[in-house]
Image: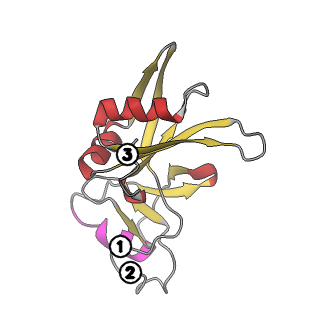
Amino acid sequence: MDGSQPLDPRKTIFVGGVPRPLRAVELAMIMDRLYGGVCYAGIDTDPELKYPKGAGRVAFSNQQSYIAAISARFVQLQHNDIDKRVEVKPYVLDDQMCDECQGTRCGGKFAPFFCANVTCLQYYCEYCWASIHSRAGREFHKPLVKEGGDRPRHVPFRWS
């Protein structure tokens, strides 16, 4: 929508259950109307079939719009004859270092966990997740990890 804005993957959401007839420009318009600040929207397609997978991504130009979208968790997409409730989550990246230790406590490995709680919004290695999320008020945060097909999922985390 706004090609002058740089895309920030940390202000990007995953939208699951996107109706296949919905186009990226329509998804962008709906999300911009709801939250403002949309600078990009894309619909994931199967590379062989060139057919929509039913998932999309929306990038925002500002943190407020991003937080408003992920806080909603679900959005009602209404456009022409489409009226569907879809899930919204932070878009989780593969190759991020731990925001807490920058890889020093995990041997330089990429961080497997992302905390989608608006008080965190950071990537963590296992050591730092356990340390930060054992604190009062954070013990109920749930980590997200990237799974196949660009879809983030919650994982159970057991305290040692």
The x, y position of residue 113, in whole percent, is 45, 64
Residue 83 x/y as whole percent: 47, 17
Q: Tell which circle, 3 or 1, labels the residue nearer the N-terminal end.
A: 3
Of discs 3 and 1, which sits in the foreground?
3
**In the image, what residue occupies the spot 41% across and 56% down?**
7
In the rendering, which numbered label is found on residue 2?
3
Which residue carries the number 2 mark?
Answer: 102
Compared across the picture, whether 56 is left or right of 98 comes to right
Residue furthest to the left in view is 136
Q: Which residues are magenta?
A: 126-136
Q: How far apart are labels 3 and 1 at the CA level?
A: 28 Å
Nearest to N terminus: mark 2 or mark 3? 3
- Residue occupying the point 37% across, 38% down: 73
Do labels 2 and 1 touch, CB within 8 Å? Answer: yes
Q: Are marks 3 and 1 in contact (CB under 8 Å)?
A: no
Q: Residue at x 44, y 75 (%)?
A: 97
Q: Depth check: 81 or 141 in front?
A: 81
Q: Residue at x 43, y 73 (%)?
A: 125
Main secondary structure of the magenta stretch: helix
Q: Amino acid at mark 1?
A: Asp
Question: Disc 2 marks which amino acid?
Answer: Gln
The picture places residue 71, in percent across and down from the top left corner, at 30, 41
SS type, badge 2: loop
Query: Which residue was labeled with disc 1?
Result: 99
Q: Secondary structure at mark 3?
A: loop
